[in-house]
């Protein structure tokens, strides 16, 4: 993982977390900090996975796609599992 890949992952994670938090109505129950942290962590994990799979060592379009995809998936997962009210199993 390069410094460019790490910096891009942090920026993309913050952007996806913020946009997801404010654009999607279902994310209102998720705190802003949680959406941002999950976006950054999942984007960085996506970069690590691509770095392990690709021995080239250069930042490329695949890295960008995986960063965005993993950040969106992470924020969506948190939105689906956090803040549900009124779901009484009885």
Image (spheres, rainbow, N blue to C red):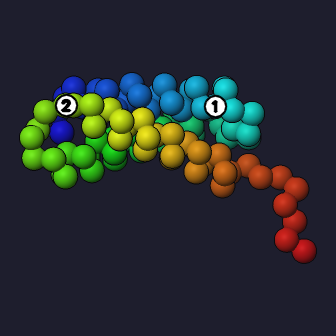
**Residue 73: x, y in percent?**
51, 46
| Residue 40 seen from this side | no
**Residue 12: x, y in percent?**
41, 28
Q: Which mark is residue 86?
A: none
| Residue 25 seen from this side | yes
Name the residue at 66% across, 51% down.
Answer: 80
The single residue placed furthest to the left in the displayed view is: 56
**Residue 75: x, y in percent?**
55, 42
Name the residue at 34% across, 47% down.
Answer: 45
Mark 2, secondary structure of its residue: loop
The single residue placed furthest to the bottom in the displayed view is: 90
The picture quadrant where one finds residue 69 is top left
50 lies above or below 36: below
Q: Which residue is mark 1?
A: 21
What's the distance in space between the residues labelled 1 and 2, CA to CA? 27 Å
Q: Left or right? Give the position of 86 relative to 44.
A: right
Other-residue count near label 1 (Cα within 10 Å), few / some / many at <14 / 14–19 / ≥20? many
Name the residue at 69% across, 32% down.
Answer: 24
> Mark 1 against mark 2, which lies toward the viewer?
2
The picture quadrant where one finds residue 22 is top right
49 lies above or below 43: below
**Residue 52: x, y in percent?**
18, 52
Other-residue count near label 2 (Cα within 10 Å), few / some / many at <14 / 14–19 / ≥20? some
Q: Which mark is residue 59?
A: 2
Pick whichever, 61 or 14, lies toward us. Answer: 61
Q: Left or right? Give the position of 26 relative to 33.
A: right
Q: Left or right? Give the position of 36 relative to 26.
A: left
């Amino acid at each position: 993982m390069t410094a460019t890949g790490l910096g891009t992952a942090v920026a993309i994670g913050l952007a996806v977390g913020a946009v997801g938090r404010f654009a999607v109505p279902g994310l209102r129950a998720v705190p802003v900090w949680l959406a941002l942290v999950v976006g950054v962590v999942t984007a960085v994990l996506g970069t690590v996975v691509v770095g392990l799979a690709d021995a080239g060592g250069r930042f490329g379009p695949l890295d960008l796609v995986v960063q965005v995809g993993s950040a969106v998936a992470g924020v969506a997962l948190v939105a689906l599992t956090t803040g549900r009210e009124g779901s009484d199993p009885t």
